[in-house]
Amino acid sequence: MRLVYSEAVNAGASLRLAPIAGEPDPDGADCVACGRCCHHGPETVSLLESDEARMSEATLRALTVVMDRPPYFRFLRNDGHRCGGLDTSVEGRYPCGIYAERPQGCRDVEPGSPCCMEARALGHLGTSVLFKRSERS
Ligand code: SF4
Ligand code: SF4
């Protein structure tokens, strides 16, 4: 998991989703109804070179932004509340709008992982850097 945190990340008061209790389905069946890990502040999910190579030019232009200062990481763009790649066209549903192109960091957040459980408990992605893969086989 390669999430990079900035001072702007944990503006919890501006993130209005309610926490969700309990363990999610380990195979992701609850993710679209949850979406908590896709709610976070700017400069949270950074892109690897391999992520940039996977993304189309249109997606890179529309949904990513490069820092204007060293180390010039490229991040997923967002509005300060959630990832710009999130499809919010249906109320209460949070599918990833760029699922096939999503960065490796997003792929590594597994349902039931520490990162997931923190996001569900807070209602948004928090400060945890314990982005370990869950222990399921
Ligand atoms: S917080 Fe967990 S259950 Fe919710 S969308 Fe993310 S991975 Fe899925
Ligand atoms: S790219 Fe998709 S999976 Fe990753 S934070 Fe954005 S909406 Fe969520």
Image (cartoon, rainbow, N blue to C red):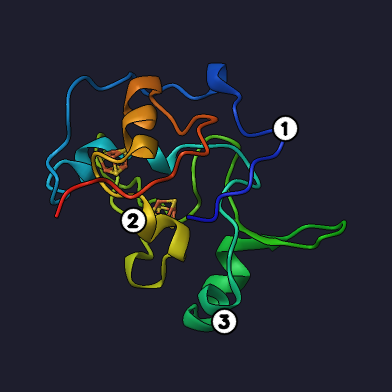
- The residue carrying mark 2 has its beta carbon less than 8 Å from ligand 2: yes
Look at discs 1 and 2 and give the one toward the viewer: 1
- Residue 46 pos. (x, y %): 60, 58
Q: Is residue 13 shown left or right of residue 120?
A: right
Q: Tag 3 or tag 1, which sits nearer the N-term?
A: 1
- Residue at coordinates 12% horizontally, 41% vertically from top-left? 25
10 Å crowding of disc 3: few (<14), some (14-19), many (20+): few
Give the spatial CA distance, label 1 vs label 2: 25 Å
Q: Residue 92: image x %, image y %? A: 25, 34
Label drawn at residue 52: none
At mark 3, the secondary structure is helix
Q: Left or right? Give the position of 66 relative to 17.
A: right
Q: Judging from the image, what secondary structure is the residue with disc 1 in?
A: loop
* Three-letter code, disc 1: Glu
Q: Quadrant of ligand 2?
A: bottom left
Tell me which amino acid carries mark 2. Cys
Work out whether residue 131 or residue 45 is closer to the camera in this orientation and state it: 131
Label 3 vs label 2: CA separation? 18 Å
Label 1 crowding class (10 Å Cα cut-off): few <14, some 14-19, many 20+? few
Q: Residue at x 38, y 24 (%)?
A: 123
Mark 2 — residue?
96
